[in-house]
Amino acid sequence: MYPPAKHQENDKGHLLEVIKTYPLATIISVKDNTPLITHLPLIYRETDGKLIGHIDIYNPQTNLLKDENEVTILFYGPQCYISPSIYTTTQLPTWNYIRVHLTGKVTKIESTEALKQSLITMTEFLEAPEHNYVLESDNPRLDKNLEYIKMFEITIDTWEGKFKLSQDKKPKDKENARQALIKANQESIKQFLDSIF
């Protein structure tokens, strides 16, 4: 398995933390040797360990998210370039990142009531901890749009964590890389948004 063992994360609790903190997933299906890729938030349901999602009926991948079809799911944590200048020892440039790769089988959920409750539950999860908005079950816009959304569940078959965080460096260099990752992610978002807006 790649990357090397020192960058593999096998602690399921750590992998779940990535999924919960960065729920926007990349879902990959394959049809006729062609990948179909969609980016959707997926919520981990604690009661049965399944991922729950919703997809627009007009998305071409919708027809593949059913009937126990297999999918690959990627979750992306923070990432950044690491300059050798941050280390106290001589190093080469590198890139640090956190990723979670899953595979699973999809089941389409046909119940409109389950879909409706799932959208309410997902909104509640994504609004945490402030809960500034509550999606009410009697919201007319919700009812009007239910026919355009399909719900699905993913039963997870395999878990793989790739956490490349300078684990092989000396403690001071590892901490420097941690601080660089925090700083880079805070600054790069602002700089990027400033450049496109």
Image (tube, grey):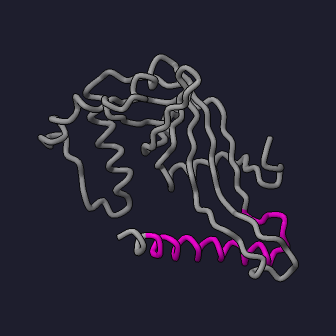
Would you identify the image quadrant in which residue 35 lies? top right
Residue most extreme to the top: 67
Image quadrant where one finds the N terminus: top right
Q: Is residue 136 left or right of residue 55?
A: left
Q: Residue 173 appears at what percent x and percent y? A: 79, 76
- Which residue corresponds to the image point at 52% horizontal and 72% vertical from the top-left? 188
Q: Residue 132 appears at what percent x and percent y? A: 26, 62
Total numbered labels placed on residues in the image = 0
- Which residue corresponds to the image point at 73% horizontal and 46% vertical from the top-left? 10
Q: Is residue 109 above or below residue 91?
A: above
Would you identify the image quadrant in which residue 43 lies? top left
- Which residue corresponds to the image point at 29% horizontal and 43% vertical from the top-left? 120
Image quadrant where one finds the C terminus: bottom left
Q: Main secondary structure of the magenta part?
A: helix
Q: Is residue 143 left or right of residue 7?
A: left
Q: Residue 25 appears at what percent x and percent y? A: 50, 45
Q: Is residue 153 left or right of residue 180?
A: left
Would you identify the image quadrant in which residue 32 lies? top right
Question: For the magenta stretch, what is the residue range?
Answer: 165-192
**In the foreground, 92 or 163:** 92
Q: Is residue 195 above or below residue 98?
A: below
**In the foreground, 61 or 3:** 61
Is residue 166 a member of the stretch shown in magenta? yes
Residue most extreme to the left: 140
Residue most extreme to the right: 90
Q: Is residue 129 above or below residue 70?
A: below
- Which residue corresponds to the image point at 45% horizontal and 25% vertical from the top-left? 65
Is residue 66 a member of the stretch shown in magenta? no
